[in-house]
Image: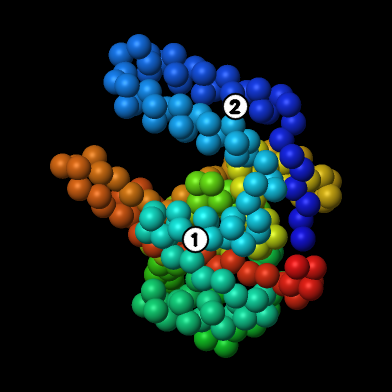
Amino acid sequence: MTNLTPLNKTSEKRRTQFFKNIKKAVNQNNLSHEQKQNLCKQEAAYQKFKYQPDALSEEQRLAQFKEILASQSALFYECASEELAEKLEELLKEHSDENEILIGKNSDVEKFGLTKSETINFIEVESFEKNKENYNLTSALTTAFAAASETGTLFLSSGPENPTWLNYLAKCHFVLLDKSTLCQTYEQAFELGRKQQESTNQPFPPRSINMISGPSRTADIEQTLTLGAHGPIELIILIYSSKENASEN
């Protein structure tokens, strides 16, 4: 299980100042008595919560994450790491007309034995770019290095094994997430990413970090919600737990 460290005083001061700036912009003098009471209640709840990592247990973070993902039209499935291949095969049949799925170079999916599947054809980016005319790919698979339960947000770092464009061009986007990397806040997710990169002697942050909260959407046209406007129509998250993590819990 990944150990999460509490926010330091500097981070807490920045959050507090951020909310103070919002209050000034809102100009509370023009608010009704009821609106002022609601703001006071929200501030009291924040002061009590303090965004500490022990404010929510692992199961509470998971429940919060599921609830927010559902409200954002994302799909969520939980399974053991050894069940990932079977689950992915099932979901690909259900959500795609193709048995092919695009992955990055030396993708992490190999360590789960996914590429040994007899029913899924995994296509690496390099092969796809050389023979685009031979493929009609509608699905992509990437991995998230962390997630924040407070907003239902996935954090994906860029790199050869996780090309940024995979997150946006496929109609159906599958994302693998290790249960032990489910944090509560953005700050904890970034701190976790920093520790992961340091353990492999890689710089942090990478060239880009993509934060994804649900499938692509817009309501610009006549205030009608449309999915898939600027990216995937479907976001499917597979959150897995390894035997090692299960024994530690």
- Image quarter of residue 32: top left
* Mark identifier at residue 99: none
Q: Earlier in the sequence, mark 1 or mark 2?
A: 2
The amino acid type of the residue labelled 2 equals Arg
| Helix, strand or loop for disc 2 | helix
Query: What's the residue type where badge 1 is placed?
Result: Lys
* Residue 62 shows in this picture: yes
Q: Which residue is mark 2?
A: 15
Say whether residue 145 is left or right of residue 173.
right
Q: Residue at x 71, y 24 (%)?
A: 10
Classify the position of the N terminus by image quarter: bottom right
The CA distance from mark 1 to mark 2 is 25 Å
* Residue 27 placement, left or right of 112: left
- Nearer to the camera, 187 or 198: 187
Element under disc 1? helix
Q: Residue drawn 65% across and 22% down?
A: 13
Does 4 sit above or below residue 187?
below
Q: Quadrant of the C terminus?
A: bottom right
Q: Position of residue 27 (x, y in %)?
A: 37, 14
Task: Return the residue nearer the eye: 240 or 143.
Answer: 240
In the rendered image, the vertical position of residue 70 relative to residue 88, given as above or below? above
Is residue 224 shown left or right of residue 110? left
Crowd class of label 2 (few under 14; some 14 to 19; many from 20; radius 10 Å): some
Q: Is residue 248 above or below residue 36?
A: below
Q: At which x and y percent is residue 40?
A: 45, 27
Coordinates of residue 140 in the picture (x, y in percent): 49, 64
On screen, residue 156 above or below 233: above
Residue at (43% x, 71% y) in the render: 134
Residue at the spot of label 1:
66
Q: Position of residue 193 (x, y in %)?
A: 71, 46
Q: Quadrant of residue 38?
A: top left
Identified at 77% across, 43% down, the residue is 5
